């Protein structure tokens, strides 16, 4: 794949591609600084037939990070009619070809990090740009989507506040109404309906964003990328060597089980990827932890730290910042 230039005159899709390539390098370097043994292993992949591909950077079995991936994809081709039908719920003006398909371009970075220590939170980040084209190759519709969220096994107020504050600061530079809107959207999106709880303590989430100049939104995406390392690295530095018990590790396994349930049963991104022809299954399922657990009818002891977390997951706070 060619490396696009991040210049003011380049199309938005090329500048987004340059951005995700740059941020993949920055984020992996920032996380590796916390890991004494393992390193991110790059894996270039292609969809074939000139339909793009991606670069997956995966880390496994480290002292700090049990598993994680920071993946970029730049893919294009034709969306099948079933995918087009689902998209029309939010994009009613989407025009398809005679066979029901739609030419598309998608570019993004998706990341999930599962630390080894149960006191260190899992995190997820995804920012993407999507374009559809007419039959003659001219752009038809476009939008941005993404967000970042935190999934702790044990609740630390200062960690939650740091994560939310950094992302609020990033969004406020574009629109002060974005953070409360995207924070609520995140809680609603990552709600595990069959459990009656959220996957974690949230963050920000948005999709199908096309309500202002794409230059403005691209800059917002860059600020959100820049917020990630300051929102997460200090927490991992504090928690990675914290002592923990076997019972605390077992609780982490149960929380990871909830993570798996959401990703495989409810996550729209996972479903879209698995249903799109030529998608890289290994990269899509990179989000799953190395290990997880399910215990029949498990209920934390009243007043325990486990119960404290569950209370917040069942009743998300309106805000973590002042």
Image (cartoon, rainbow, N blue to C red):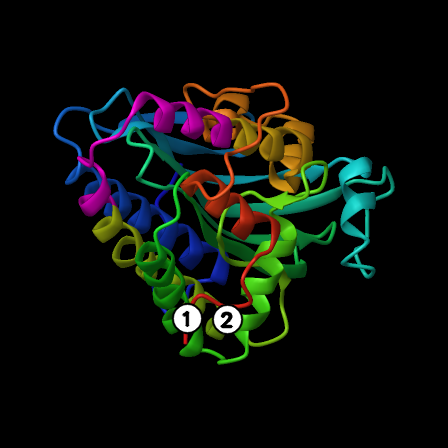
Q: Is 39 situated above or below 21? A: above
Q: Quadrant of residue 172?
A: bottom left
> What x and y, as percent, mark residue 8?
37, 70
Question: Which residue is pictured at 14% across the width and 24% down the height?
Answer: 37
Check the image and name the residue furthest to the right: 98
For the N terminus, give its image quadrant. Answer: top left
Q: Quadrant of residue 304?
A: top left
Q: Is 102 situated above or below 292? A: below
In the picture, measured across the screen, residue 76 lies left or right of residue 174, that is: right
Find the magenta span and give its range: 236-256
Q: Secondary structure at mark 1?
A: loop
Q: Is 298 situated above or below 320? A: above
> What x and y, as percent, mark residue 69?
37, 32
The local crowd at label 2, few if under 14, some if 14 to 19, many if 20 or more residues have their Cα within 10 Å, is many
Asked if residue 214 shows in the view, the reply is no
> What x and y, as percent, mark residue 12?
48, 62
CB within 8 Å, label 2 to label 1: yes
Residue situated in front as seen by the camera: 26 or 138: 26
245 in magenta = yes
92 in magenta = no
Check the image and name the residue furthest to the left: 36
The local crowd at label 1, few if under 14, some if 14 to 19, many if 20 or more residues have their Cα within 10 Å, is few
Q: Which residue is mark 2?
A: 179
Residue 243's label in the rendered image is: none
Residue situated in front as seen by the camera: 233 or 110: 233
């Amino acid at each position: 794949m060619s490396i696009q230039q991040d210049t003011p005159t380049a199309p938005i899709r090329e500048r987004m591609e340059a951005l995700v390539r740059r941020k993949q390098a920055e984020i992996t370097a920032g996380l590796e600084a916390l890991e004494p043994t393992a390193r991110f292993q790059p894996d270039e992949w292609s969809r074939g037939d000139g339909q793009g591909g991606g670069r997956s950077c995966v880390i496994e079995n480290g002292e700090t990070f049990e598993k994680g991936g920071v993946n970029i994809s730049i893919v294009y081709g034709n969306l099948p009619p079933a995918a087009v039908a689902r998209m029309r719920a939010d994009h009613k003006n989407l025009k398809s070809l005679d066979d029901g398909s739609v030419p598309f371009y998608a570019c993004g970075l998706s990341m999930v990090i599962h630390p080894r220590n149960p006191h260190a939170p899992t995190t997820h980040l995804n920012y993407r740009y999507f374009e559809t084209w007419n039959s003659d190759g001219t752009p038809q519709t476009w939008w941005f989507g993404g967000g970042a969220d935190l999934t702790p096994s044990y609740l630390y107020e200062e960690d939650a506040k740091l994560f939310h504050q950094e992302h609020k600061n990033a969004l406020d530079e574009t629109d002060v109404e974005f953070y409360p809107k995207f924070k609520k959207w995140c809680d609603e999106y990552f709600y595990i309906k069959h459990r009656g709880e959220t996957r974690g303590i949230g963050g920000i989430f948005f999709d199908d964003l096309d309500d202002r100049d794409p230059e403005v939104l691209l800059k917002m995406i860059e600020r959100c990328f820049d917020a990630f390392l300051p929102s997460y690295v200090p927490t991992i530095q504090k928690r990675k060597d914290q002592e923990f018990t076997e019972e605390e590790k077992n609780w982490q396994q149960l929380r990871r089980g909830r993570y798996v349930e959401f990703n495989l049963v409810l996550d729209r991104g996972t479903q879209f990827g698995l249903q799109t022809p030529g998608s890289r299954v290994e990269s899509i399922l990179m989000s799953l932890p190395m290990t997880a657990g399910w215990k029949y009818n498990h209920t934390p002891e009243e007043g325990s730290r486990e119960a404290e977390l569950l209370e917040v997951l069942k009743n998300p706070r309106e805000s973590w910042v002042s």
